[in-house]
Image (cartoon, coloured by chain):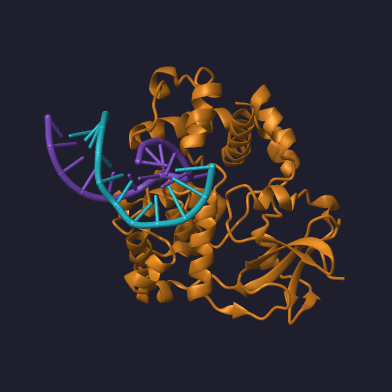
Chain colours: A orange, B purple, C cyan
DNA sequence: TCCCAGGTCCTAC
DNA sequence: GTAGGACCTGGG
């Protein structure tokens, strides 16, 4: 069977696919075994939830070997032992790290990732999944499968041509303008994501953010950092959303010398965002993107737990 | 009914 | 340059 031996490849699909970095993996049952099904580089991919060997490409309902491209998606070059070892030893992060062992930062398609995080603006995760699912079923291509109806993510040219009504039907709300604008920029080549992905972090970041390049609408610091981390694998990226802000306020304000800057703030300016991410990068190191993702998982989990108690 | 959601844009100081 | 509001819309 052409699968990957996971003994050298620490990876927990349940944690990774539910970590808010990707929105299109689905839990299902295949041959009476629990599995995840997703689309990577337009291929249908199955990941068994319990077996040791569990990554497989599926074509014509047959399990096949998967290419290096598919392996790249799972960032198999990342040595989690080394990465975790490089992170600071403070108690809170270490707890998160133990709790979410096997969390991997994926290397998703930049285009899909960009649209996904533009859709994430001011929405919760179930709603984001809904939007992406609707975009895919309405504008993607169906992949033959006997398990689930699965679609590729729509191409830039397709979304560039989509009407306002069609996009609103995908529940995009005011985001429809952003999606259409960005689709046009990518389709026309004004925004070349492959080129951007090869740039160093800071340069790539400024290319993505609207003010400087003028190339994008709906891409601020947070969305840009998510794209840089979850698709271009810039692990020095540190996306700051409301959860991470709360986490910094409650657990890291002293450590990062940010007391006066983040105190009592419900939202932050672009300048404050920059200050925080730079301090975070100094403290957490070159893999601060991993730290961010561990912390994101933990602060949300803890919040849910507190709600249940209250 | 009101509030919030992995923010960004726009406007008034 | 910075604070505050508007923004679509579904679910608690």
Please tell me which residue lies in front, A206 or A225: A225
Please tell me which residue lies in front, C1 or A204: C1
Tell me if residue A266 can be seen: yes
Rendered location of residue A309, percent (x, y) = 64, 27
Quarter of the picture containing the C terminus of chain A is: top right
Residue A296 drawn above or below residue A134: above
Quarter of the picture containing the N terminus of chain A is: bottom right
Report which quarter residue A148 is drawn in.
bottom right
Rendered location of residue A8, percent (x, y) = 82, 51
Q: Residue at x 79, y 75 (%)?
A: A64
Q: Residue at x 38, y 33 (%)?
A: A267
Residue A269 drawn above or below residue C11: above
Report which quarter residue A83 is drawn in.
top right
Tell me if residue A188 can be seen: no
Residue A10 drawn above or below residue C2: below
* Numbered disc total: 0
Q: Residue at x 37, y 74 (%)?
A: A162
Report which quarter residue A165 is drawn in.
bottom left
A43 relative to A58 in the view: left or right: left
Rendered location of residue B1, percent (x, y) = 35, 41
A18 relative to A165 in the view: left or right: right
Q: Residue at x 69, y 45 (%)?
A: A103
Rendered location of residue A43, percent (x, y) = 65, 73
B1 relative to A43 in the view: left or right: left
């Amino acid at each position: 069977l052409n699968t990957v031996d996971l003994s050298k490849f620490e990876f927990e699909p349940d944690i990774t696919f539910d970590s808010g970095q990707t929105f299109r993996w689905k839990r299902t049952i295949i041959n009476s075994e629990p599995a995840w099904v997703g689309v990577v580089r337009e291929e249908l991919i199955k990941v068994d939830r319990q077996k040791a060997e569990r990554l497989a490409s599926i074509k014509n309902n047959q399990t096949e070997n998967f290419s290096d491209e598919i392996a790249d998606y799972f960032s198999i070059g990342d040595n989690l032992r080394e990465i975790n070892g490089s992170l600071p030893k403070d108690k809170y992060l270490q707890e998160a790290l133990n709790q979410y062992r096997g969390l991997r930062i994926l290397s998703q398609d930049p285009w899909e990732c960009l649209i996904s995080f533009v859709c994430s603006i001011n929405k919760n995760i179930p709603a984001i999944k809904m939007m992406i699912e609707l975009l895919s079923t309405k504008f993607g291509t169906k992949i033959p499968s006997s398990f689930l109806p699965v679609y590729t993510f729509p191409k830039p040219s397709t979304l560039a041509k989509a009407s306002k009504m069609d996009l609103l039907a995908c529940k995009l709300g005011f985001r429809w303008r952003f999606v259409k604008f960005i689709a046009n920029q990518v389709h026309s080549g004004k925004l070349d994501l492959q080129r951007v992905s090869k740039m160093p972090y800071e340069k790539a970041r400024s290319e993505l953010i609207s003010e400087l390049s003028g190339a994008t609408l709906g891409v601020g610091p947070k969305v840009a950092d998510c794209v840089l981390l979850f698709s271009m694998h810039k692990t020095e990226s540190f996306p700051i959303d409301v959860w991470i802000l709360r986490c910094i306020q409650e657990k890291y304000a002293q450590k990062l010398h940010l007391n006066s800057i983040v105190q009592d703030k419900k939202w932050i300016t672009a300048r404050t965002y920059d200050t925080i991410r730079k301090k975070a990068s100094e403290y957490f190191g070159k893999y601060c993107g991993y730290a961010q993702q561990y912390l994101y998982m933990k602060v949300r989990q803890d919040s849910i737990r507190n709600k249940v108690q209250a």
